Amino acid sequence: MIQDVKTKQLKVIPDARGRLMEVLRNDDDIFGEFGQVYITTTLPDVVKAWHFHKCQTDNFACVQGTIQVALFDARKDSPTFGELNEFVIGVHRPMLISVPPGVYHGWKCVGLDEAIIVNIPSKPYNYKDPDEHRLDWDDPSIPYDWTKRNG
């Protein structure tokens, strides 16, 4: 696991009316600070990558559909510099992923339907000076292949 990346298995509590799933609580070990909450979606076979933040931590969970998540440690002073992590998360594998500053991240919707992702970053989005540092989804400096894995 890339240093400072954390995950939390999420528990779904169903009943006769539907289901409930807590994503992040301020008393979780994984919680640092709160900036905002937003929802983003990704259409099937679309890749949303790569980006990292200098100041904020992203905490996200896929609450509908399925996404293939990839992380790349670009922090030169990190003991896990250059390492990749991959996760498949979504409605059938509910998980929160916490991505620290300096770690590139992105995902691909690998389900048949639009994926819905809840993100709880540690800082609010700054419209005048965004903490967004991007590379193209297929940038060769990150050795990752977004091809769907068939077994």
Image: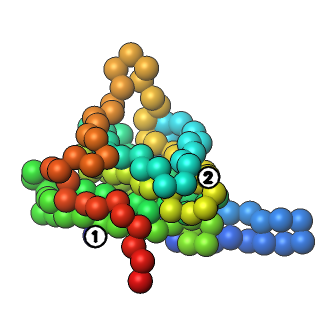
What residue sits 56% from the left and 49% below the top? 43
Question: Residue flagged by tag 2: what amino acid is it?
Answer: Glu
Instruction: Give the residue pinned by disc 1.
Output: 1
What residue sits 46% from the left and 68% below the top? 88
**The C terminus appears in which quarter of the rendering?**
bottom left
Residue 53 seen anywhere in this rendered image of the structure? yes
Q: Height in image: 25 above or below 7?
A: above
Q: Height in image: 87 above or below 52?
A: below
| Rendering coords of residue 44 (x, y %) | 55, 54
Q: In this view, does 95 lie to the left or right of 82?
A: right
What residue sits 33% from the left and 31% below the top? 131
Contact flag, marks 2 and 1 (Cβ < 8 Å): no
- Tag of residue 114: 2
Q: Residues within 10 Å of mark 1 (few under 14, many from 20)?
A: few
Q: In which quarter of the image is residue 33?
A: top left
Applied colour scheme: rainbow
What residue sits 56% from the left and 42% below the top? 40
| Rendering coords of residue 55 (x, y %) | 30, 37
Give me the C-alpha separation between circle 2 and circle 1.
Answer: 28 Å
Question: Residue flagged by tag 1: what amino acid is it?
Answer: Met
Q: Is residue 3 left or right of residue 33?
A: left
Dot 1: what SS?
loop
| Rendering coords of residue 5 (x, y %) | 33, 61
- Can you name the residue that lies furthest to the bottom here? 151
Sequence order check, earlier mark of 2 and 1 = 1
Dot 2: what SS?
loop
Between 49 and 62, which is closer to the camera in this rendering?
49
